């Protein structure tokens, strides 16, 4: 089921194999008709992650990058929509020689070709493939069929792992294996027998339950891996290794024993579990948190993970609070609660909802010297706030929200005008890695320790260069620009404890063992505030 931990399980297996010295890549398959994840609602689907080569994809690609500490490219992501699109385009080009093109085997063959290509492009020893959705759903049957066909053509080269939830009903107090038994039988109906069963539950699976799953699901007891809830997702590879998962995988593929080295990862996890670390309180002001009566953090998962792993690396314990920007819009005085935080983040987003609340929050942290980090839309709203309140440009706004604003300090990129006019929205934003030239002597330059960097983008609107000179006269420093198009990439206020915003998304490149320098600067300033 959604959220049970398939992506983290995949990423953790990848980390284990990497610690054994293998090269690993991972592929995510989403069973949606959407061609990519860019048009999906982040509350329903979670964060849209952007690859270095500009593909909008599922948040699990971000998990893979963080755990494997490498870039995952567009070749490693597919949806039902993208697969069908490729097959239909090939048929239109007469590449099937005029024969009848069918769902089976042509769609599964396209899936298999993409999987093999991902392994070839990444020159990997192992390719991990995560099939999204739930076993038994109609929409992922073509991907299960592709998996079955791969196994049939080369049995020794394919291994199946199933992530299954084992509930512990409070009124019973006993872990129940029956849902897993039925899930495996459903998978068997698709022609697949799992080699490993990753037993997700609130507590560790015991030997009695392992034996039961072994008997009814046709697997060795040693291949039932305990996957209980843990304090941090970064513990999971170490937790899997308690059941010798890495050794079982190598044994299955007849690859022999290898030495493993978890020193750096174990050292990081030790910091994660150190309850004696000083706390740093970070407020994230957004609008994609609510889903009915529940609070969901997946809309900003890369931001949250960047805050967490950066804090741990700097010897702090992160305490993150979700702050709804609409609250500050309805009641501007409520922003005074931001005084209790050591730092405030305004993450990316789109549209008008909650915008004035975010601007109110930015105004408060700027005036009260509270460390601030703005990301993408966060930069644009910081520019609007500065234009209105420091430069006295009344009514300053972004044309995304107010097309007829008297001061369009944020406006459409020239090449985006036709896309908006024709509603050509999917995959047409400024996406992926672009270079950024850093201003000598600026905070950004000191944090990076470099003159030129590359960062990932996802937006249609930019700072209007007509106003930059006015901003700089009032003390705003443009410390990063794209030299090819003279676009503003980073702004900062030198006299502030820490006030920085980026047009790009630094969270997408921050890794547990290699935190992003901008997040490091922000968390360090927030910790110093205490």
Image (cartoon, rainbow, N blue to C red):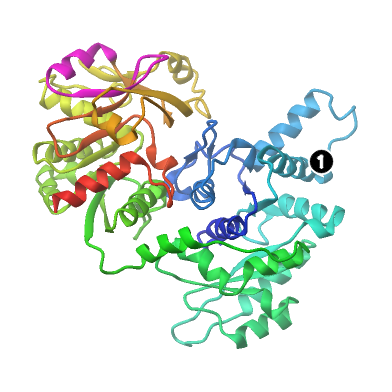
In the rendered image, which quarter is residue 519 located in?
Answer: top left
Element carrying mark 1: helix
Residue 480 is covered by the magenta coloring: yes
Q: Is residue 53 left or right of residue 472?
A: right
- Residue at image mark 1: 106
The one nearer the camera, 166 or 310, is: 310
Q: Is residue 313 left or right of residue 34?
A: left
User: Does the rendering let one see residue 352?
Assistant: no
The image quadrant where one finds the N terminus is bottom right
Q: Is residue 246 left or right of residue 267?
A: right
The image quadrant where one finds the C terminus is bottom left
The one nearer the camera, 160 or 434, is: 434
In the rendered image, which quarter is residue 267 located in?
Answer: bottom left
Q: Residues within 10 Å of mark 1 (few under 14, many from 20)?
A: some
Q: Residue at x 24, y 34 (%)?
A: 500
Position of residue 149 relative to residue 51, above or below, is below
Position of residue 98 relative to residue 228, above or below, is above
Report the span colored magenta.
Answer: 465-487
The one nearer the camera, 122 or 356, is: 122
On the image, the x and y values in percent for residue 309 come to 37, 53
Q: Give the residue at the far top of this rendering.
A: 466
On the image, the x and y values in percent for residue 92 come to 78, 24
Q: Is residue 360 left or right of residue 195?
A: left
Residue 467 is covered by the magenta coloring: yes
């Amino acid at each position: 089921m959604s959220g049970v931990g398939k992506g983290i399980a995949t990423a953790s297996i990848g980390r284990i194999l990497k610690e054994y010295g293998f090269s690993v890549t991972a592929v995510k398959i989403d069973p949606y008709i959407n061609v990519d994840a860019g048009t999906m609602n982040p509350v329903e689907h979670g964060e849209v992650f952007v690859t270095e080569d500009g593909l909008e994809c599922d948040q699990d690609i971000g998990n893979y990058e963080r755990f494997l500490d490498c870039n995952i490219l567009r070749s490693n992501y597919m949806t039902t929509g993208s697969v069908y699109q490729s097959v239909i385009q090939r048929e239109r080009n007469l590449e099937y020689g005029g024969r009848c093109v069918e769902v089976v085997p042509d769609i599964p063959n396209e899936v298999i070709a993409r999987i093999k290509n991902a392994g070839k492009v990444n020159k990997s020893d192992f390719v991990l493939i995560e099939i999204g959705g739930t076993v038994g759903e109609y929409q992922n049957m073509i991907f299960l069929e592709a998996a079955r066909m791969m196994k049939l053509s080369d049995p020794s080269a394919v291994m199946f792992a199933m992530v299954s939830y084992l509930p512990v009903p409070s009124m019973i107090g006993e872990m129940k294996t029956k849902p897993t038994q039925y899930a495996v039988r459903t998978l068997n109906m698709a022609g697949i027998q799992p080699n490993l069963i990753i037993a997700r539950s609130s507590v560790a699976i015991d030997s009695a339950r392992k034996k039961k799953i072994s008997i009814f699901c046709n697997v060795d007891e040693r291949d039932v891996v305990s996957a209980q809830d843990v304090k941090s997702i970064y513990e999971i590879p170490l937790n899997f290794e308690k059941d010798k998962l890495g050794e079982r995988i190598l044994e299955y593929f007849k690859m022999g024993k290898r030495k493993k080295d978890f020193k750096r990862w174990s050292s990081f996890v030790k910091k994660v579990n150190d309850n004696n670390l000083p706390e740093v309180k970070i407020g994230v002001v957004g609008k994609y948190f609510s889903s009915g009566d529940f609070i969901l953090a997946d809309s900003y998962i890369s931001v949250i993970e960047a805050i967490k792993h950066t804090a741990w690396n700097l010897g702090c314990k992160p305490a993150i609070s979700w702050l709804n920007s609409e609250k500050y819009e309805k009641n501007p005085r409520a922003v005074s609660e931001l005084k209790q935080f050591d730092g405030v983040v305004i993450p990316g987003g789109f549209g008008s909802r909650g915008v004035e609340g975010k601007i109110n929050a930015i105004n408060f942290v700027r005036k009260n010297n509270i460390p601030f980090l703005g990301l993408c839309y966060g930069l644009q709203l910081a520019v609007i706030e500065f234009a209105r309140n420091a430069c006295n440009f009344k009514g300053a706004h972004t044309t995304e929200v107010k097309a007829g604003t008297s001061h369009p300090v944020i406006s459409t990129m020239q090449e985006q005008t036709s896309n908006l006019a024709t509603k050509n929205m999917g995959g047409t934003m400024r996406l992926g890695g672009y270079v950024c030239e850093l201003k000598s002597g600026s905070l950004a330059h000191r944090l990076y320790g470099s003159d030129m960097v590359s960062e990932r983008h996802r937006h249609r609107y930019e700072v209007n260069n007509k106003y930059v000179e006015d901003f700089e006269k009032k003390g705003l420093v443009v410390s990063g620009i794209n030299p090819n198009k003279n676009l503003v990439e980073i702004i900062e206020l030198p006299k502030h404890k820490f006030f920085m915003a980026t047009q790009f998304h630094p969270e997408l490149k921050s890794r547990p063992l290699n935190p992003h320098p901008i997040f490091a600067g922000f968390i360090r300033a927030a910790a110093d505030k205490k």
